């Protein structure tokens, strides 16, 4: 059977036709995914998810392109979604590390977490709000930018500047000695 006939039969529920479509498309798809991912296991995982999505959406395939082209477009979206998810997870881990580091620094300097909250309270809203949205509520820089109508780069800059100010407030420099003095010494 030709590809168009196999697609028609598969849409009607013919499992053998669907299996034949996948059997003939798999080598091409896997080669593409290997070039995309540079990882055999990841390529196979994306191929499996691609076939799963293709089965779910087979009725939407219009046949204006080759079946393999349609699979490539699905596979590309699956791969890009996977990369975005990994990027968000890495970003979240970095956020968590930053907060843990700030907590550790306050504890190492015999300061209470309440001192951090007090230092945050002394920041202007334009610095405090992005920090709270980022580190307490877990929003991405992009989401924060949309919430407060500000470019993503500006949000990143304000979070960074605000955290530096909080750290400075928690570890003031004694002007006479040039050494850091604990908050309790005023």
Image: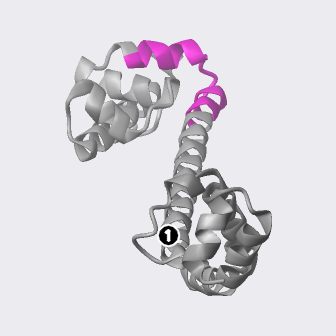
Q: Quadrant of the N terminus?
A: bottom right
Does the segment drawn in magenta span residue 76? Answer: no
In the image, residue 143 lies at what x, y percent? 36, 34
Q: Which residue lies furthest to the right in this view?
A: 16
Residue plotted at (25% across, 25% down): 148
According to the image, label 1 marks what residue? 70
Against 162, residue 54 (above or below) is below
Mark 1 residue element: helix
Of residues 12 and 94, the one drawn nearer to the viewer in this rendering:
12
Against 119, residue 158 (above or below) is below
Residue plotted at (39% across, 28% down): 131
Residue plotted at (34% across, 28% down): 130
Of residues 145 and 40, the one drawn nearer to the viewer in this rendering:
40
Q: Give the colour scheme of this rendering.
A: one colour
Of residues 120 and 96, the one drawn nearer to the viewer in this rendering:
96
In the image, residue 10 lies at what x, y percent? 67, 63
Q: What stretch is highlighted in magenta?
A: 102-120
Describe residue 15's horizontal placement relative to residue 150 as left or right. right
């Amino acid at each position: 059977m030709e590809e168009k006939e196999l697609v028609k039969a598969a849409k009607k529920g013919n499992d053998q036709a669907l299996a034949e479509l996948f059997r003939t498309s798999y080598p091409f798809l896997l080669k593409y995914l290997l070039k995309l991912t540079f990882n055999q296991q990841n390529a196979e995982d994306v191929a499996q998810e691609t076939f799963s999505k293709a089965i779910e959406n087979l009725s939407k395939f219009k046949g204006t392109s080759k079946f393999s082209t349609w699979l490539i477009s699905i596979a590309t979206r699956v791969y890009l979604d996977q990369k975005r998810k990994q990027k968000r997870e890495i970003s979240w881990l970095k956020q968590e590390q930053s907060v843990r580091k700030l907590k550790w620094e306050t504890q190492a300097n015999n300061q209470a977490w309440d001192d951090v909250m007090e230092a945050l309270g002394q920041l202007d809203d334009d610095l405090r709000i992005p920090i709270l949205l980022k580190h307490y509520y877990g929003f991405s820089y992009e989401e924060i930018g949309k919430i407060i109508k500000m470019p993503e780069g500006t949000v990143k800059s304000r979070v960074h500047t605000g955290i530096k100010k909080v750290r400075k407030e928690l570890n003031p420099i004694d002007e006479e000695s040039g050494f850091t003095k604990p908050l309790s010494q005023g």
